[in-house]
Structures are given as C-alpha cells and as structure tokens.
Image (cartoon, rainbow, N blue to C red):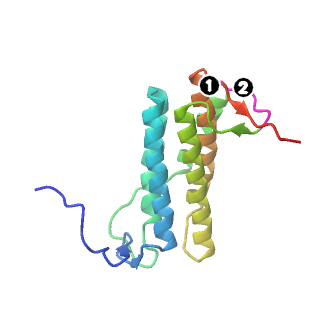
Amino acid sequence: MSFKIYTRTGDKGQTSLIGGTRVSKNHIRIESYGTVDELNSYLGLVNDMAADRRIGDWIREVQDRLFTLGAELATTQTKEVKMKLPDLHVSDIEWLEQRIDEMNEQLPEMRSFIIPGGHQAASACHVARCVCRRAERLCVAMEEQGEHVSDIVLKYLNRLSDFLFVLSRYITHVNGREELPWRARI
C-alpha cells in the first residue's frame, strides 16, 4: 500500500507543527519553513542547470541542512516533542565558510556590485539567494514576535546567502562567462 499524500486535516486553513500544535497556515512559523522549502526547491533547479558534479555535491549538502533547518522551524515550542530531530551544528556554518573561501580563491576580485545573470544556473542561484534572505528576515520577524528561533538557524541562513552569492559568481566563472558589473548612472 502506498503512502497517501493527503490527510484532509488542513482543508480549513490550519496545519500541525511537529509536536501537534495546530496553527493557521498563514502563521509566521509556517511562512518561515515554507520559504526554506521554496529555497530548497530553487537549489534543486540550480543543481539541474549547473550540471556540475562538485557544485551538485555542495548543493545536496545544503539541501540536507535545509531539511534539518525546516524541521526546527516546524517544531512546536509549547509541547514536548517525542521524536528525535536532526539539528544544525557550528560545523555546518564552518563548512559554508570553507566553500566560500575555496570558491573565492578562483574568482576575480569584486570591484563593484554584480548584476545577476551571466548563466542560467547563476541566475537561478541569485534567485535562491534572495529567497534565502527572505527566509532570514522571516526568522528575525518570528523572533521579534516571541516565537523562538535558535541563533544557529539565523547564522546558517545568513552565511548561506553569502555562499549562494559566491556560488553564483563561481558558476559564471567555471562556465567561462563574464560577470556584468553594475555601473551607477551619474
């Protein structure tokens, strides 16, 4: 017997967090992990467009961490959760920083803002970066509204957006394309 994807429990605009708390589907916690899911989907698109094994390995690592991050955001804060959930580690942030440094060693010095584009995968990566920044803003707003968000989630999303910016430049570079520097009209 196959697993049914529909439960009908959300037909009236409510859903359950991990732990059982029911909330509106427009609750900021749902919006935050929904945005992380959107980011994860864009990264799948980047991976498919980049068609590069090394980049693919990096993206799959990030996608795995995003499932972990999403699970944390989807967990109720008012009840004890009975299942063991994965968690983020400082080493996950350090991994992003190492990849950023590794890519930067091969990139030309940035002397201006870069206009997104240059290669389809790089453009999709810029979109993913923007979605990542939105997820970060939602997590900050969630914290400001009294919903707990761990420091490591905020740090990871912040560093991930940096990683995605550098990855977009790296994709452009490894595909032999030119970056388009932004020239302010004066």
Q: Nearer the viewer, residue 59 or 90?
A: 59
Disc on res. 76: none
Q: Quadrant of residue 162?
A: top right
- Three-letter amino acid code at disc 2? Pro
Give the residue drawn at x 60%, y 61%. 151
Mark 2 near mark 1, Cβ–Cβ under 8 Å?
Answer: yes
Q: Main secondary structure of the magenta part?
A: loop
> x and y percent of residue 156 in the render?
57, 52
Q: Which residue is mark 1?
A: 173
Q: Is residue 87 visible?
A: no
Q: Magenta stretch: give its range.
A: 106-112
Q: Which residue is mark 2?
A: 108
> x and y percent of residue 147 in the render?
55, 74
Q: Nearer the viewer, residue 131 or 69?
A: 131
Q: Quadrant of residue 180?
A: top right
Q: Determine the secondary structure under disc 2.
A: loop
Q: Between marks 2 and 1, how big is the CA–CA gap?
A: 9 Å
> x and y percent of residue 186 in the render?
89, 42
Relative to 75, say whether 70 is above or below: above
**In the rendered view of the protein, which quadrant contains the N terminus?**
bottom left
Q: Determine the secondary structure under disc 1.
A: helix
Is residue 150 rendered magenta in the image?
A: no
Relative to 178, say whether 98 is above or below: below
Q: Nearer the viewer, residue 52 or 154?
A: 52
Q: Is residue 129 visible?
A: yes
Relative to 86, say whether 185 is above or below: above
